Amino acid sequence: MRDTKRLSSTTVHDRQRRGDGRGRTDDSAAVEGSDCPGSLIVVSNREPYRHEYEDGGSADAGDSADGGRPTESDGGARSTASQRSITVDEPTGGLTAGLDPVVQATDGTWIAWGDGDADFDVADERNCVAVPPDEEAYTLCRLDLSEEAVDGYYYGFSNRVLWPLCHGFPDLIEDRPTDFEWYQRINERFADRVGEHADDDSVIWVQDYHLALAPRLIRESVPDSATVAHFWHIPWPTPATYRHCPAAGRLLEGLLGNDLLGFHVEGYADRFLDCVDRFLPNATVDRADRTVRYDGRTTRVVATPMGVDAKSYDRDARSTEQEQVSSLFGEYGIPRGTKLGLGLDRLDYTKGIPERLTAIERFFERNPDWHGDFTFVQKATPSRTEIETYERYGDHVRGEVERINRRFATADWRPIVYTEDVLPREDICALYRHADVMVVSPLVDGMNLVAQEYVAASVDGDGTLVLSDRTGAHERLGSHALTIDPTDTDGFVAQLEHALAMPPYERRRRLNTLRQRVFAGDIETWMDTQFDWIRRVHDGSGEGETSTGSDSTEPTPPV
């Protein structure tokens, strides 16, 4: 979810970054606790702020080109539509929302692909713009990618090879002829932009699987005293699966350009070390310290589970009003007084939605007394529809919902309410708060923040989390959630029955513990842990230590 601000493009053009490429220098604006040891440069595929024309058109439809190779645009901020209204999408959740205040506090730089249709019309001659729009706290530096580059780098190697590979679906890998070449080119361009902004004391923090080659390329373009770190937000595969990677050695070499490499859970970190041990015979792996020595450098590997902004979800859930809930129920035809189940996912084959629907169908087969008294709401977000596998998956999910509803629906009740509507955050928090059962059942997931958002928003203490044992979140929440194997239909159904029959005191006991853990391991705690590790590496004090990713304290959440 993203908040949107409406601006005129004239106003946006007045908000350019400082000429030296940095944001503001007002030290009083620093956020207490953002303890980055040097000047911070975040590098990610996704940008934290996106500028869009409100009418949906672009000022200049031309693509960048250089003999078929993508190049960054020149010529300064374009002003061909100076009076057109521009909206600014702002982060409201996940990584971008968590990192944004940290980069603001450090007067840092964020380098990302600019995919908004007005992004480059508000930028300067270096494709940079000061953000946030009202504060100009740091520099957002955008890469302008051609459609061909996006197809090869993003829809190609990133999401046709690395995504299925890392999630354990090697049969879905599509290794098209030029995709890796595009992936390498775009990683080079990211590295080049980092080199333009880095100095001796810089901390470069790379995000996720789109930029696996970048760390080694960055290392070659920045001062040796700069620190390069990387957080890998998705699972890491076993060596048996990783052998299907068409560029296995190159990716490992790229990631070993990092001084610090982070994963959500220890299992992923250990699998990475297993792959290095198997596929890079010249590397020296120290499993006790979780370090790798390769090509004259040492990479430390750590496990730190990511959290959510628990306080904001708690606050937003408490602010929901009964009128809003009644309106939502009325809009989607949910009878008042029914028990509510909830699923919230991207339409991605890793999320296990068909398996979930099969379990719900079996539940209604076995429990006719629940017909009319239990409604499952599935909010789904179409994703990567340019990839045929995703398009087929979405069609299958929609077809299953229609079939199950035809089988069980009555004149005034549907067992499954399915929507792909874009819901504002306040509606999502209302659904979280009022859901009796939250079902999070991916086939595999690096962490899963939805489970934690639900717990944080369950301010009344009477919901139940049904959680797949194949999520990273299960390591933190599994003991007090109802655990499922998403492929075991009968076991899945049994846990749904348990959730709906659970006595109120047990629901409260379980949820109270879950809330303690979510608040103790929130996004702020995760950030502190990241910068603690980065500081150790940056200062050279992290040798001989290992990360457990465990929670040291469990503060009581708001009640």
Image: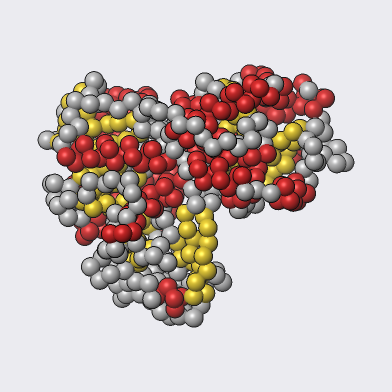
5 or 77, which is in the foreground? 5
- Disc tally is 0
Residue at the image position 51 percent from the left and 35 percent from the top? 557
Quick check: 24 above or below 430?
A: below
Q: Does residue 381 appear to the left or right of 79 in the view shown? A: right
Q: Does residue 263 appear to the left or right of 58 in the view shown? A: left
Q: Residue 161 appears at what percent x and percent y?
A: 41, 40
528 or 505, which is in the foreground? 505
Q: Residue 90 appears at what percent x and percent y?
A: 47, 58
Q: Residue 44 appears at what percent x and percent y?
A: 36, 50
Residue at the image position 40 percent from the left and 42 percent from the top? 524
Looking at the picture, the colour scheme in use is secondary structure
Quick check: 183 above or below 369?
A: below
Rendered image quadrant of residue 292: top left
Indicate the quadrant containing the C terminus: top left, top right, bottom left or bottom right.
top right
Residue at the image position 39 percent from the left and 53 percent from the top? 100
176 or 491, which is in the foreground? 491
Q: Does residue 361 appear to the left or right of 137 in the view shown? A: right
Residue at the image position 56 percent from the left and 28 percent from the top? 512
Judge whether residue 527 can be spotted in this image.
yes
Q: Residue 167 appears at what percent x and percent y?
A: 45, 33
Q: Does residue 115 appear to the left or right of 376 in the view shown? A: left
